[in-house]
Image (spheres, helix red, strand yellow):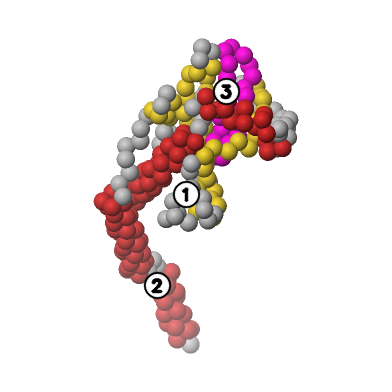
């Protein structure tokens, strides 16, 4: 009786021990291999598309090498960023510093405007002009819109060289100022090179920068994905 019981128990114990032993890793290996193949296929498809887009841009609408000077302004192109800086000396003790964004808005083209009929919208650029004098600590700042063929002043205010206070008084809306004062401030900027022609140049410059940054972005993405 006891002998008959021992044999079945021994068989059960052997099966339990077999189940507890490490199983072959063939299944995991196959699954990992398939996952790796899929990942490589996805990445290769991304690389193929990036290479095509880069080649297309360079063949059909290649960006120009950005210029470093316009009129008497020195241009800091800020590669990889969405804005540029320009600066110049004016007169004996003035410095003009300009910060310009890439295209940040647009409006529909109005009928009868001076904008080319081929354009459906007017692109907008934000432009901040700082005028500094000598060793003084104050800055006269103009916040402007640069349209394709004109400059529009939106705000004029004073602040220190070390930055703007949390809630500076920025005066009334520019268009509420006396017309003669508005015209005088436009003349003030124009004599310092901030003119309609300057805005037209910025739009051409930013169109080229937009192409250039797009190609740079694709090149960086391609290089990252190619890394093993």
Q: Which residue is mark 2?
A: 18
Q: Nearer the viewer, residue 213 or 22?
A: 213
Dominant SS in magenta? strand
**Residue designated by label 3:** 131
Label 1: element kind: loop
Query: How far is mark 3 from mark 1, CA to CA?
Result: 30 Å
The reply to whether residue 46 is visible in this rendering is: yes
Residue at 49 percent of width and 27 percent of height: 193
Point out which mark residue 20 bears: none
The magenta segment: 126-145
Sequence-first disc among 3 and 1 = 1
Select label 3 or label 1 by which is in front.
1
* Residue ID for mark 1: 115
Residue at 44% over, 26% down: 73
First of labels 1, 2 by sequence position: 2
* Relative to 112, residue 135 above or below: above
Going from the N terminus, do you reach mark 2 or mark 3 first?
Answer: 2
């Amino acid at each position: 009786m006891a002998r008959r019981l021992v044999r079945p128990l021994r068989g059960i114990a052997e099966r339990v021990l077999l189940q507890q032993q490490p199983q072959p890793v063939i299944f995991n290996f196959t699954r990992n291999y398939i996952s790796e193949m899929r990942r490589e296929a996805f990445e290769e498809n991304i690389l193929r598309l990036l290479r095509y887009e880069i080649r297309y841009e360079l063949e059909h609408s290649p960006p120009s090498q950005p210029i470093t000077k316009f009129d008497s302004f020195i241009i800091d192109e800020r590669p990889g960023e969405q804005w540029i800086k320009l600066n110049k000396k004016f007169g004996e003790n003035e410095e003009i510093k300009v910060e310009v964004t890439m295209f940040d808005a647009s409006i529909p083209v109005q009928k009868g405007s001076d904008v080319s009929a081929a354009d459906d919208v007017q692109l907008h650029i934000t432009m901040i002009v700082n005028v500094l004098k000598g060793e003084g600590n104050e800055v006269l700042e103009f916040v402007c819109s640069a349209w394709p063929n004109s400059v529009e002043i939106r705000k004029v205010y004073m602040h220190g060289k070390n930055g703007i206070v949390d809630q500076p008084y920025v005066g009334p809306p520019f268009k509420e100022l006396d017309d003669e004062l508005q015209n005088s401030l436009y003349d003030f900027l124009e004599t310092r090179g901030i003119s309609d022609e300057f805005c037209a140049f910025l739009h051409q410059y930013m169109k080229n920068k937009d192409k250039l940054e797009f190609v740079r972005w694709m090149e960086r993405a391609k290089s990252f994905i190619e890394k093993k």
